[in-house]
Image (spheres, rainbow, N blue to C red):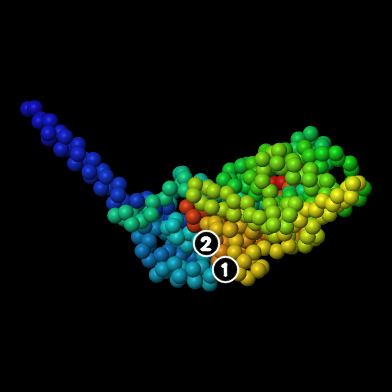
Amino acid sequence: MRIKRKYVTLTVLAALCLGLLWKISFVEVPLLLVAAEASPWRNVNEQLLGEIAAGRQTLIVLKNWRRAVRKLGLAAGDLIIAEDLTELRRFLRDRPDALAVIPWYDARPGWRTLRLNGLYFWENQRPYPLVSRCFSWGWLPKYKPRRVKNITIGGQVLLARGVGQVIDRTSDANYPWQGVAGVLRAADLAVVTLQAPLVYDYVKPRSPELLYGKARYADGLSYAGIDLVALSGRSMGDAGVSGIRDTLDILGKLNIPHIGLAASPDAAYAPCLFKLNGLRVAFLARRWSGPSKYTETDLRGVARTYYLPEHSPSDSPGEQAPAADLLILLNNDGADSSVNFWEGGNLADGERSKAAPQLGSLIFDQPSGKTGGALQRIFVYGKKVAAVDVLPVFLNDRWYTEIK
């Protein structure tokens, strides 16, 4: 018996309609394991999951997601049900040793997104095991990995003194960066602070207190994929105004923009703007200590001056920062660096301020505090900060910076 063509066509159309209906009616929702910032946990493995199942660790779940969590096999002997995110936040604050399960779109930078068997969700989306397929009728947001942007910020970079000696000994300007370059290159934007100037006609400093390095040391910045350099270090004037001029010229030849040091006060306060698929990011620099300007007079009596920012727009009430979806302020105090960032475009609004831990030093020749330093990674989904990840770094016995 021959089937009429119209029935075949109708069958195909019905199958396509059912497939489309299925696609718009169900959505995959990754579920994240999170903890409070004071929590001792950073990675969840089989052993920790076993302790949760045995009731030795507390697991907090949202009421609406209890069934989905059970289907994924996350059994818990000590289970707390939260009515909403406000209650879940309160539970995490009161129980810093507890873990919580939330849908991906409820992630906040105030919570620590935990790695699952060493995989960080915001940078390793596939394969991700904790995915619930939910009936949505289109109201649940669909996760799209390509919308995640990674902004990585490092602390002070010293390309002088002991670091310069290591580069000269190895004949490799990239040597000090080899342990952190992979993380920096993986970022959509990578930013560091340069602590000391670089010069063309290098002469060994007369005093160990003077810090400056050779121009070729800057090749490591390109190797590490640095997209922006803040010039607000206390030692930027150690090679005089000519050293500052050389540094700006070297960065210009490498096509690396800079902030925080310029030939006019207005330019010193000027932000650097980037655009990441519609996300507008503005970077500003603030100097905490040291001189506010460097002046030198040449043999003809012509004075040349370079200026550093003394404060930020957040220090002056009513002063507005440039319009941006994400504003990042790079602070510097000698060998320590820190980061503040704001969502929404108004630096004067203190309630939107989020502070990061001290980043310390990134490329250095002696320990900076007990932990060395850190790389801070800000993960943005669309135009919303979803997570902040901090990677501690240290100087290993082979004299290059390594992630702890």
Q: Pinpoint residue 310: horizontal percent, then vertical percent.
A: 73, 62
Residue designated by label 1: 349
Q: Residue at x 74, y 41 (%)?
A: 250
Q: Pinpoint residue 393: horizontal percent, then vertical percent.
A: 69, 51
Mark 2 vs mark 1, CA separation in Å:
9 Å
Going by the numbered disc 2, the residue's amino acid type is: Gly
Q: Are marks 2 and 1 in contact (CB under 8 Å)?
A: yes
Q: Residue at x 82, y 51 (%)?
A: 304
Q: Pinpoint residue 246: horizontal percent, then vertical percent.
A: 79, 43
Whichever of callouts 2 and 1 sits on the residue coming sooner in the sequence is 2
Residue nearest the viewer, comparing 175 with 402: 175
Q: Which element type, helix, strand or loop, lies under badge 2?
A: loop
Q: How many marks?
A: 2
Q: Is residue 24 left or right of residue 392?
A: left
Residue nearest the viewer, comparing 266 with 373: 266
Residue designated by label 2: 344
Which class describes the residues within 10 Å of circle 2: few (<14), some (14-19), or many (20+)? Answer: some
Going by the numbered disc 1, the residue's amino acid type is: Asp
Residue 1: image quadrant is top left
Q: Identify the residue at the far top of this view.
A: 2
Q: Which element type, helix, strand or loop, lies under badge 1?
A: loop
Q: Is residue 397 above or below residue 352?
A: above
Q: Is residue 4 left or right of residue 127?
A: left
Could you tell me if residue 335 is visible in this image? no
